[in-house]
Amino acid sequence: MKRLLTRGVVALALLASTLLGATPASAIIVIVDPPPTGEMSIELVAMAGSGCAPGTADVAISPDNSAFTAIYSAYLAQAGPNIAVTENRKNCQLNVLVHAPAGFTFAIAKVDYRGYGYLQRGAVAQQRANYYFQGMTVGSYANHAIAAPLDDNWIASDSVPIASQVFRPCGEQRNLNINTELRVTKGTSTDVSYLTMDSTDGSIETIYHFSWMRCPTK
């Protein structure tokens, strides 16, 4: 599955010199004002996993151009009587190519995850995610326990401090890998419990917010 969407970008640019070997040691944190106005595009190159069968996930630029969304339509983990243990854990890996405006690069600064949960008292549920650029050993990791009992929407947010943000190296076109996971175990419960990144209308958006950095000029 491949989809290409192009929009103008209005975003915040941040410079974290310790995270980019190509950035001069004398560089300092800079907020770009006005923000970059060049065009960007996002392409969903590939996806794989038990939580995102072909045709059930996509990516798009957010309306204000400061983030992109991953949209799922069939991402569900469940546990309970007569449910196979293979249904307890579902995962999805998205391989995304982001074309940044000329002269800029980016990092993931904040992520908002949303879904629905029906968890019996005593059930145990968790959402986990990490994201990193191809060929880089550093990445950002987050785990969120989803408390039971629950019969409602859930939301989890990760904010990455500036010092921990991992920027794509300037001048390189490395794909961004986004790995997400849902886990549900019945624990002491006696009935079915489930957790989704899904909704009754068939879509739920996981939003990845950008930090932008101006690349050094030679």
Image (cartoon, helix red, strand yellow):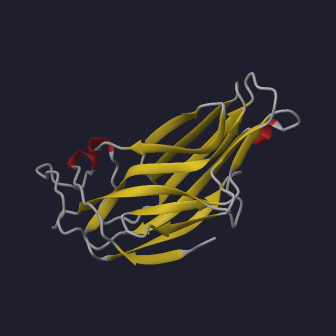
Tell me the residue at 35%/69% (across/down): 100
- Residue 31 in sight from this viewpoint: yes
| Corner quadrant of residue 152 | top right
Q: Nearer the viewer, residue 132 or 9?
A: 9
Report how many numbered discs are placed on residues in the image.
0
**Relative image position of residue 157 (x, y in whole percent):** 45, 44
Is there any visible trace of residue 139 in the rendered image?
no
Q: Quadrant of residue 11?
A: bottom left
In the rendered image, the residue lying farthest to the left is 26
Q: Is residue 187 left or right of residue 171?
A: right
- 163 and 19: which one is in front? 163
Name, please, the residue furthest toward the top. Answer: 188
- Seen from the viewer's position, the closer of residues 177 and 200 is 200
Residue at 38% in and 69% down: 65
| Residue at the far front in the pictured view | 151
Of the 4 image quadrants, the one containing the N terminus is bottom right
Residue drawn 44% across and 78% down?
Answer: 6
Residue that appears at 45% across and 63% down: 68
Query: Residue 47 location in percent, x, y?
Result: 62, 60
Question: Residue 7: x and y, percent?
Answer: 40, 77
Where is residue 4 drawn, in percent x and y? 51, 76
Nearer the observer, 3 or 153: 153
Vertical arrangement, residue 135 with respect to residue 164, above or below: below
Left or right for 141, reference 166: right
Q: Is residue 91 left or right of residue 7?
A: right
Image: 108 above or below 67: above
Specify the quadrant that holds the C terminus.
Answer: bottom left
